[in-house]
């Protein structure tokens, strides 16, 4: 039984732009300054100095609170499943993600390092704004990372079937036939950019999930990002693999890809697609009927031991 794309990834928090962080902190300064009474007998210079200190304190606290809340809500990468970690590394880059999180976290440390030595709020605001603006590339990276992570389907802890094959061989069409799941279907390669997901009921109440992986070519040493996603699902999520063979394509290339699928040592079924338009007989044995494929999948799922090392 495959592990899941951790539910924590659904809750990856959003991150504001630098100017928005600054503006929100200034709002707290404006609101907070009005609530702090100043003694009437204080000299004007003391009143001004205390007001400056209050504004610096409120601004730094606002930024600190925002950054700390964001970091605390971000999932701890090392606590995610190996499948999720590999998927994140493929799509975003774990090292880049850790660097950006560290740089955002350091905003508070840098601001705190000079807040006590800065005498006027104007000077402090300039320096603090500079620190926040310098983190813009990392804030932008985290914003984009969140958008990418939220595109991932939430895999459940269920027996998992992985549809695997070249681009445009009919994986997404087969997913719809097996599960009723709807996804983008088009007559060009690499239509599937991420992982499409559907579920299928068997034995009346039991459920398995079926992953339509992005199309991949037989070139493990030269994979693009889309192909790496497919290999991650194949190696980390699948309990059973369905290799989709297209008789209208080059046979030798598909044989090489089939060899890669077999190397996983996982239960493997071969489905022959596009038999209605094929102009030459297939050189490979496989299933051509979708209902028979369903039966074969269910039989393999029943026999397949659950994956426990994920």
Image (cartoon, grey):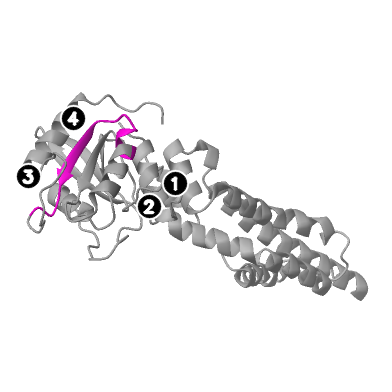
Which quadrant of the rendered structure holds the C terminus? top left
Q: Earlier in the sequence, mark 2 or mark 3?
A: 2
Q: Is 212 on the left or on the right of 7, as rendered? A: left
Label 1 near label 3: C-beta < 8 Å? Answer: no
- Mark seen at residue 87: 1
Q: Are marks 2 and 1 in contact (CB under 8 Å)?
A: yes
The x, y position of residue 8, in whole percent, is 44, 45
Which label's residue is closer to the chain start, 3 or 1? 1
Residue at disc 3, secondary structure? loop
Q: Is residue 205 visible?
A: no
- The answer for how far apart the CA atoms under marks 1 and 4 are is 26 Å
Q: Are marks 4 and 3 in contact (CB under 8 Å)?
A: no
- Judging depth in this view, the residue of 176 and 19 nearest the camera is 176
Binning the other alpha carbons within 10 Å of mark 2 as few (below 14), some (14 to 19) or many (20 upward) gives some
Name which residue lies at 51% across and 36% down.
79
Labelled pair 1, 4 in contact (Cβ < 8 Å): no
Q: What element carries label 1?
A: helix
Residue 160 within the segment the image draws in magenta: no
Q: Mark 3 points at which residue?
A: 289
Is 180 located above or below residue 201 in the figure? below
Looking at the image, tell me whether mark 4 or mark 3 is earlier in sequence order.
3
Identify the mark nearer the N-term, 2 or 4.
2
Mark 3 residue crowding within 10 angstroms, few (<14) / some (14–19) / many (20+): few
SS type, badge 2: loop
Q: Mark 4 points at which residue?
A: 300
Q: Can residue 119 be seen in this view?
A: yes
| Residue denoted by label 2 | 152
Segment tinted magenta in the rendering: 260-275
């Amino acid at each position: 039984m495959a592990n899941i794309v951790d539910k924590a990834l659904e809750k990856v928090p959003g991150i504001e732009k630098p100017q928005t962080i600054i503006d929100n902190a200034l709002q707290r300064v404006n609101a907070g300054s009005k609530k702090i009474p100043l003694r009437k007998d204080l000299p004007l210079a003391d009143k001004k100095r205390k007001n400056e200190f209050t504004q610096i304190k409120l601004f730094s606290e606002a930024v600190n609170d925002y950054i700390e809340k964001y970091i605390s809500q971000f999932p701890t990468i090392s606590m995610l499943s190996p499948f999720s970690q590999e998927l994140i590394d493929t799509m975003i880059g774990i090292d880049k993600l850790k660097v950006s999180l560290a740089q955002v976290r350091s905003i508070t440390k840098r601001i705190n390092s000079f807040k006590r030595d800065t005498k006027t709020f104007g000077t402090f605001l300039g320096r603090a704004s500079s620190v926040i603006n310098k983190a813009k590339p990392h804030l932008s990276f985290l914003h984009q990372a969140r958008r990418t992570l939220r595109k991932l389907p939430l895999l459940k802890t269920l027996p998992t079937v992985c549809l695997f094959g070249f681009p445009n061989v009919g994986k997404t069409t087969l997913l719809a036939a097996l599960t009723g799941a709807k996804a983008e279907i088009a007559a060009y390669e690499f239509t599937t950019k991420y992982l499409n997901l559907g579920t299928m009921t068997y034995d009346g109440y039991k459920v398995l999930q079926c992953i339509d992986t992005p199309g991949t070519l037989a070139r493990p040493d030269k994979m693009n990002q889309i192909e790496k996603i497919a290999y991650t699902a194949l190696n980390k999520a699948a309990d059973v693999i369905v290799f989709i063979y297209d008789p209208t394509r080059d046979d030798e290339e598909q044989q090489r890809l089939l060899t890669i699928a077999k190397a996983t040592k996982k239960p493997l079924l071969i489905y022959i697609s596009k038999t209605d338009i094929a102009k030459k007989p297939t050189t490979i044995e496989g299933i051509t009927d979708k209902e028979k494929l369903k039966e074969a999948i269910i039989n393999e799922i029943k026999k397949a031991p659950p994956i426990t090392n994920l």
